[in-house]
Image (tube, rainbow, N blue to C red):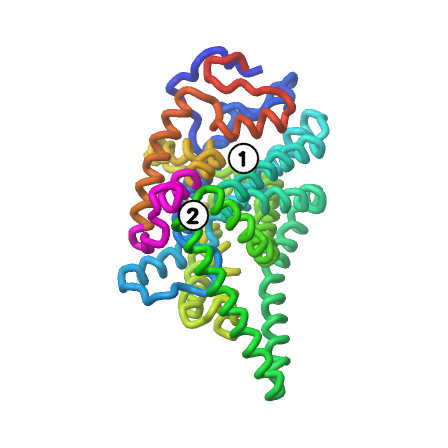
Amino acid sequence: MIDTTERPTATRPRLTQAPAPPRPETTVTAPVQPGQRMPIIDVLRGFAMFGILLVNMALFNHSFYSQIIGPSQPRGAIDQIAGWAIAFFAEGKFYSTFAFLFGLGLAIQYRRFQESGQGFVPFYLRRLAVLLLIGLIHAYLFWIGDILILYSLLGLVLLLLFRNRRPKTLLIWSCILLLIPILVNGALYGLVELGRTSPEGAAMVDAALAEQTQQYQAAAAQADQVYAQGSYAEITMQRVQDMNMVYGTLPFMAFNVLAMMVLGLYTGKRQLFEHLPEQLPFVRRVWRWGLVVGVVGNLLYVVAGEFASRNIPSPLLLLSLLGQTIGAPALSLFYMSSLVLLALRPWAQRRLEPLANVGRMAISNYLLQTVICTTLFYGYGLGLYGQVDNALGVLLTVAIYGVQLLLSAWWLGHFRFGPVEWLWRSLSYGRRQPLALAAQG
């Protein structure tokens, strides 16, 4: 077993170094210890945490309904450019990264349990149940933009339907799942256009869409007022109401998330991250194609989306959705392969360690972002709701993430896991895990 009675030395594993194989007597009754982790995976998580905050900043600052119907007032040039940049470089890319790493993590854990001869499914079901509980608490008591609920539910699908599939089958399913939202939205648009084939039908469709827009506008006005001026109790009541709307949009997002989870599972089954130096030609191909497809797809997403309404089916909206459906995962793969290639260079090893620290306690940092931003924006805090434009939001993101870089380094200098990661692991493994570095492992 690994000796954990003393503090680790200054020697750190390389970011692309796979963990040492377990000794014959090693079991999987405890989480992977810091010395056994794959640091490059933590780097990817840490980088994704910045992008998650960058995108979520608008949802902290505006209601969910406002995101659907768009801004009620014209935006300035700088704000507009910042909004385009966030849409192009960040929207959809980082929850895709986390979904990919979620599937990769399942593959790695499944292999460890198989090698030890222990039952994996009961353990992973507990792990998903705890994650779901954390997500529900986060969504209903703090912020409606939670992603953990969706990850935990789709993690169950991944576990039951995909964990024993062959890599080639997983790759095919990943592509199929990406195509489903495009087909569904295309079918919905077709139904709307079918209803317009007669003058009476066109009038009914237009009236229904206009009424829907008015309902969104009224809901946005109410939500914006409550979040900006309400007490914690009032905001919580509004949040519970808004969650019903959020659940209605999750199915459209679920296929993209599951597709990236399946792709991560495919990568894990092929053990690409355990043999990165040997996989350089493949990583470079992913980098090139991710860049090309990502740039084209996201240009289509931003340009077509600028002239389309998100709540009214149209050819431009379909083009925008097509661009994001293909472009967001592609650019996500480009970001990940770029970091992998960078991590293979010796001079970059030390410089990427701060990202790894943030990634090692990703859930804690994710929830901390919610606590900080809701305190800044909501009525029971500083009341900045609706007053931060896209450009200022970028600066605020950099500032908050900078604090998290420092805080993560300090915390992991004293503890093995982030606080929420420690709780998640303790409940998943059914016993209290050592937290302090000096504790007996």
- What percent of the width, then of the height, locates residue 228? 39, 50
- Could you tell me which secondary element the residue under label 2 belongs to? loop
Q: Nearer the viewer, mark 1 or mark 2?
A: 2
Q: Amino acid at mark 2?
A: Gly
Segment colored magenta: 370-392
- What percent of the width, then of the height, locates residue 382? 34, 43
What residue is drawn where x is 71% and y is 46%?
161
Q: Which mark is residue 409?
A: none
Question: Which of the two residues, 75 or 251, is positioned nearer the viewer here?
Answer: 75
- What percent of the width, then of the height, locates residue 434? 53, 18
Horizontal side of 414 relative to 156 (left or right) equals left
What residue is drawn where x is 58% and y is 44%?
149
Whichever of callouts 1 and 2 sits on the residue coming sooner in the sequence is: 2
In the rendered image of this protein, does residue 308 appear above or below residue 238?
below
Horizontal side of 265 relative to 337 (left or right) equals right
Assess whether residue 384 is covered by the magenta stretch: yes
| Dot 1 alpha-carbon crowd within 10 angstroms: few under 14, some 14 to 19, many 20 or more | some
Q: Would you say the residues marked 1 and 2 are in contact, meaning their CB atoms lie under 8 Å apart?
A: no
Assess whether residue 411 is covered by the magenta stretch: no
- What percent of the width, then of the height, locates residue 325? 52, 60
Q: Which mark is residue 230?
A: 2
In the rendered image of this protein, does residue 403 appear above or below residue 98?
above
- Which residue does the numbered mark 1 point to in the structure image? 274
Question: Which of the two residues, 286 or 416, is positioned nearer the viewer here?
Answer: 416
In the rendered image of this protein, does residue 98 appear above or below residue 62?
above
In the rendered image of this protein, does residue 76 appear above or below residue 281?
below
What residue is drawn where x is 32% and y is 55%?
389
- Could you tell me which secondary element the residue under label 1 belongs to? helix
Q: Which quadrant holds the N terminus?
A: top right
Q: Residue furthest bottom?
A: 199
Q: Amino acid at mark 1?
A: Glu
